[in-house]
Structure formats: structure tokens, C-alpha cells
Image: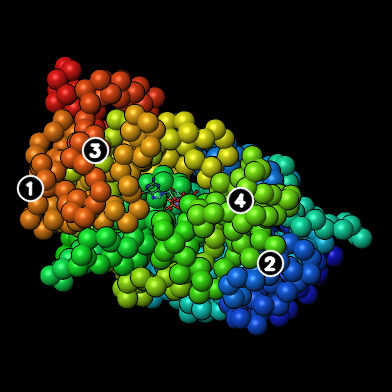
Amino acid sequence: MTVLDHDVVADQLKNAPTENKSVLSFVSRIAALTSPDDIVWIDGSDAQKNEIAEKLVEAGTIQRVNGTKDSYYAASDPEDVARVEGRTYICSEDEKDAGPLNNWVAPAEMKETLNGLFEGSMRGRTMYVIPFVMGHAEADQPMFGIEVTDSAYVVLSMLVMARSGKYALDAIDAQAAKFVECVHSVGAPLEEGQEDVAWPCNTTKYITHFPEDRAIWSFGSGYGGNALLGKKCYALRIASAIARDEGWLAEHMLILKLTNPEGVVKYVAAAFPSACGKTNLAMIEPTIPGWKAETLGDDIAWMRFGDDGQLYAVNPEFGLFGVAPGTGYTTNPTAMRAIEAGGNIFTNVALTDDGDVWWEGKTDEAPAHLTDWRGNDWTPESDTPAAHPNSRFCTPIANVPTLAPEWTNPNGVPISAILFGGRRKTTMPLVTETQDWTHGVFMGSVLSSETTAAATGAVGVVRRDPMAMRPFIGYNVGDYLQHWINIGNTEGAQLPKIFYVNWFRRDDDNSFLWPGFSENSRVLKWVFERVTGTADAQESPLGLTPVEGGLDTEGLDFTDEQLRKALAIKPEEWETELGLIEEWYAELGDSVPAELRAEVDNLRQRLGLA
Ligand code: GTP
Ligand code: SPV
Ligand code: MN
């Protein structure tokens, strides 16, 4: 860095809205490295947001959408459409602390690589400074971050997804608070006179985490979890490492409030892998009379023990970043109404001829002509989807009509039940209740799901995804499972019951065995009544399952035979599954806690395969 750079940066920081030394030194350090043309501090005002959006419209990165107010559409580079797990790193000092599932590079080495990549990477661009808080600034333990980014699209998205701007910066200043340093560049500097592209990015991508420094550096991608650093990078990978140190849980879970016809309230959290139904369940409209469901979170839950020994869950996010395809008035009317309220950013969906958005499943029938997410003409006869399978709507959570009033509670709500589940065509029954915490942790540790388009790579391949956190655990998976066991051993803990569900089992003709979506309320009712002690259950090799007639199917066009199939535990499938579970534990090696290894033997016994 030259003396001149110092002067330039000092000049750029003259109008900084803070005198906080740690904030200023972070921002000036990154500015000196990346050499942006100017620095803009995000204050969270509508005026500033509109100004930035306007510039993006002019540049052709986004366009206004006609269907909903204050809404924009962006199409990404076709090579930048999802999380890149292969380019995601946990850079702990000790390789063991990244564990067998994460990519690892020593921090010093990674920092050298990143310094090379980030040097001058913002040339010709504006560097935006986004102060944010995950959760509430008023929480017992507020969790701050500052993202610097050269992507205005990221700014608009972060304003939806996290409490950002002056509110967060003032709280950082007032509390002299620490913050997670989040550094993001699309990695596409502009030379003098060089014309920009609509979606700048780089074929080289690094999504890197330094759990000991509590820092995140992301290079080369502008999309979703790669670039909105408050989301997966902070609220899961870095937060899970903090949670391990401090005795709480940072999880890939929705949070749902349930009220029964008598007015009794229970809160449920559920972990399903990416694109496996969290947003849908978080916004469920129950089909059973008298039951009410309200939304608290759709992707991430932080759970800490309250004084009463219960686990209290808070949603650290401020918006939804939902999978668009499959979201429609018949499947998720609540999400559709949230979208209708405006303030959306749509990415990689299709455009109608009158400038509105469309995606597969939005309406039963596709419009006769569309512009697909790649910008090509599309008709119902086309053999590629109009919207990318991982296309998303980014929508303020305040839009959700079923939002529970407790969403303003800085320290969250007490959780009575945790659901684990995945996308499995076979083997996994519709619902089982685990026997106790350790058995529940075991079932979470062997969670399996067919891969989806939420990450790059093959789709539809069954893989183990412990607690739906495989791509998001910021440390060693064995230590993570031990941490779950330790949480259960916490003195005075009033633990939630743990259940395992599968909405995605198929019949012989490959159709879904269970209607899913709103009808999942029938399973939630059983879960609720197991918690309140009013529903019966019977023993099975996997734990407790509903007794005959125990699952409310009244009013549902569903035969006893279908229900039997949905709940079945088939010995031949489980013989195979047990082998896969043993392989999985062998892959994880010695780090798997002894309590969980014992559960494999228990399962073998109960299946009669010992
Ligand atoms: P991420 O945001 O990637 O973490 O995904 P998510 O877990 O929130 O998944 P989401 O609710 O967006 O659902 C993903 C896909 O699964 C959508 O295409 C839904 O239509 C479909 N889906 C959700 N719930 C059900 C269900 O109960 N049954 C069936 N068959 N499909 C479902
Ligand atoms: C997921 O993949 O689980 C998501 C989308 O919620 S992203 O923000 O890209 O991680
Ligand atoms: Mn997710």
C-alpha cells in the first residue's frame, strides 16, 4: 500500500457516520486493500435504498417488476446461481477443528491467497459498508456484523435479510460492541473506461471463514448464501462456532408457533436441508379445524437456555430468501401474500411479457410466453424450466401475514419440539418420535436427504446431512454432535422432544405418498399432543409412532392403506439403511460420541438385525 492510498482512504472516510475506532480501522484496512472509487455507508433509509436501486436499474443489473410494488428482478450470471460448497472453507488454526466434512486451508495461507485476490478488487466500484445485527440489538447477547461489499445487489438484499443500517451502527457504537468482520467482493474490478456487465462475478470463488477471528471473506460470487454474509456464513458457520464455545445452538431451522383449539400455545423448530420445506412449514395454513399456526422464522434459529431451563429460539434474520419454484396459492398461500405486500427482490425467476415475474408452480398453468431466467424466449413447450430451480424471492418477514407477535421478542420463544427431516423417496416414515434427547440427536446425526439445486452439484443424490447442517457447521462435525449431547446434559435443562419426519416418501408409481404442505398440520397436531401428553403412541424400532387412528386424517381423501404405507418401517429398507448409517459413522471416524455409536447398536437390536 502506498502513501497515496492512505491519503485516498482517509479522504474517503472523511464523512464516515461514526468515530468508532474499530469500525473505522476495519473499513479503512479493507478500502486500502481493495481500492474502491468511493465508500458509501448504508443507513437503512428508504431514500438511500431507492437511490441505489435506481442506479442498479440504470446499470441494467436489476429491473423493476410490475406485479408487486417496490420490487425488482435480477438475473445472475448462469454460472453464479447457488451456494458453492466445494469453494467454501473453514480456516481454523488446527485442521482437526474443521473436521472431515469442511474444506480446510491454514488461516495464514488462506489470508495470503485472499490478500492477492482482494488487492484492487473493488477498483472502479463503490464499496458499501453495511452495519447489521443478526437478531435484535436489544437481545441479551446482541450479535453484530459489518459487511463491506462492492455489490449494490447485495446491499439491497441485506437490507431485506438483516436489520441493517444506522440502527445497527448506533448500537455498535453505544455498546462499544464487537462485530463480525464480513468482507465481500464480486472480484470484478473495472479498469478506466471498461463497461460493466449486468452481473459481475469471478470464475474463481472463495467463501472463507475464520472461526477464531470471527471473520468472513467471500470472493467471486454475488449470489445468496455466498454473498449475503449475515445469513449462512455468519448466522450458521461463525455462530455455530461461537455457540459451541458458549453453550447454545445455531441451527438451520424454522420456528413455528402452534395454537390448539383450546388456546394452548407451543413453539416448534424444524431442521430440513436446503430446499426441503422449511419456508413452507413455517407458513403453513392448517387444514384441521380450530388449529392456528404462526410464523417466527423460516431458515435459521439460535437457541439459548432461559432461566427456566427451556431452550429459547430466536430468528436472527429479518427477511425470507425463499425458493420460488413450487411456491403458489395452492402450496404456500401465506408466502404468496407476503410477496404481494411488495419490497421484493426476485432472482433468476422468469419474466412475463408485461413485466411481472413467474416461476414453475406460481400458477397451475404457465403463461403462453415468458422470458426465462437466462433471458431467452420461453413457451410451455420449452424443455428447460423458465425459472432456475434455485431461483429465489427475497421478501421482508414483516410482510408475512401469519407473523407471530413474538417476532419482536429479542430473546425468542421456548421450544417444545424439534423436528428433523429430509427428502427421502423410501425408508423414512412420515413421522416418528425419538425416545429421548440422545436418541433424537442420533436421528439428527444420520439425517439423510436427496440433494437439491440449492447448492451446485448433482441433484437427487442421497447424502447424510446431520441436523440439516452439513454445509453450515463451522467446526468439526464430531465436536458438533458432542455439543448436542452436552446441551442435553446441561443441568436443569427442560429439553424439547425430538421427532423425525419425511414429507417426501413416494408410492410405487413415484407419486408422493403424503399430500404434504397444509396437510402437514396433521403431523404437527400429533407432535403437539405428544408434547402435551394427550396423544397415544406405540413402540417401533425407530422410536414412537402414532397408534392406529392416532394421526388425524379426518376430511382428508386418504385411505388407511396409504397411511400405513406412509408410516411403514420396512425391514428390507432398514437393513440397507443400517449399513449406510454404519458407513456414515465410519466416515466420521473416532470423533463420533460414544453415546451415538451405542445408538447404532440399539437400532440394530430393535430392528432384529443383531
Ligand atoms: P432453503 O431456503 O433452501 O433452506 O429451503 P426450504 O427448506 O425453506 O424449502 P422450501 O420450503 O422453500 O421448499 C422447497 C421445495 O420443496 C419447494 O419446491 C416446495 O414446493 C417443496 N415442498 C415443501 N414442502 C413440501 C411438502 O410438504 N411436500 C412436498 N411434496 N413438497 C414440498
Ligand atoms: C439454503 O441453501 O439453505 C438457503 C439459500 O437458504 S442460501 O442463502 O443461498 O444459503
Ligand atoms: Mn436454508
Identity, as a three-letter code, of the amino acid under mark 4:
Ala
User: Which residue sits at x=10%, y=36%?
Assistant: 539
Q: Earlier in the sequence, mark 4 or mark 2?
A: 2
State the residue position of label 3. Answer: 562
State the residue position of label 2. Answer: 354
Task: Give the number of the mark in front: 3 or 1.
Answer: 3
Q: Separation of disc 3 and disc 4 at Cα?
A: 33 Å
Identity, as a three-letter code, of the amino acid under mark 2:
Asp
Q: Separation of disc 3 and disc 1 at Cα?
A: 20 Å
User: Which residue sits at x=36%, y=71%?
Assistant: 403
Identity, as a three-letter code, of the amino acid under mark 1:
Asp
- Say what secondary structure mark 2 lies in: loop
Q: Separation of disc 3 and disc 2 at Cα?
A: 44 Å
Q: Earlier in the sequence, mark 2 or mark 1?
A: 2
Q: In the image, is residue 96 above or below residue 525? A: above
- Say what secondary structure mark 3 lies in: helix
- Say what secondary structure mark 1 lies in: loop
Q: Are circles 2 and 1 on residues that touch, CB within 8 Å?
A: no
Q: Earlier in the sequence, mark 4 or mark 1?
A: 4
Label of residue 387 in the image: 4
State the residue position of label 1. Answer: 536
- Say what secondary structure mark 4 lies in: loop
Task: Give the number of the mark in front: 4 or 1.
Answer: 4
Instruction: For residue 172, say whether it is visible.
Output: no
